[in-house]
Amino acid sequence: MIALESANQTTEKHESQRRSREPVIECCVITQAVMIRLRSSPYRVLRILTCEFRWGHLIIYGTVPTYYMKQVAQETVRPVPGVEKITNRVSVQSTTDFG
């Protein structure tokens, strides 16, 4: 019985380690897919945005000139498989604020 419990614990440990590595690979693939969508946007301001992705949660960062562009950024990345939640931390700074 003790040997069986030890074997089960070892199996669970290896399974846990395998699962902890998989999200890192998946995270990189999803982040890359998000960045490809942003970089290929017809809107130049979206091409300079950045993001972080962990456990289904995407956070978008950067600055855009209008609230419309902030929303477009969010909707551009929404269709990426694996993105379950989006936090839009893009700030809006109009061109008149730069001047």
Image (spheres, helix red, strand yellow):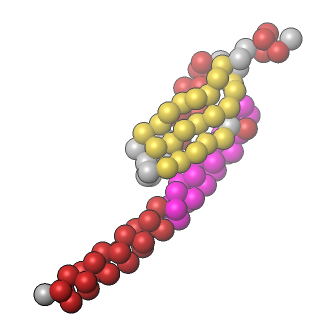
Check if residue 4 falls in the magenta segment. Answer: no
User: For the view shown, which residue lies furthest in the left direction?
Assistant: 1
* Image location (x, y in percent) of residue 78: 48, 40
* Image location (x, y in percent) of residue 50: 66, 41
- Residue drawn at 51 percent across, 42 percent down: 58
One can see residue 79 in this view: no
* Image location (x, y in percent) of residue 46: 68, 35
- Residue drawn at 57 percent across, 52 percent down: 31
- As displayed, is residue 92 above or below residue 96? below
* Image location (x, y in percent) of residue 72: 57, 29
- Residue drawn at 61 percent across, 55 percent down: 32
- As displayed, is residue 58 above or below residue 33? above
Question: Which of 85/43 is in front?
Answer: 85
Q: Tell me which segment is drawn in magenta.
A: 24-47
- As displayed, is residue 59 above or below residue 65? below
One can see residue 4 in this view: yes
Question: Which of 4/91 is in front?
Answer: 4
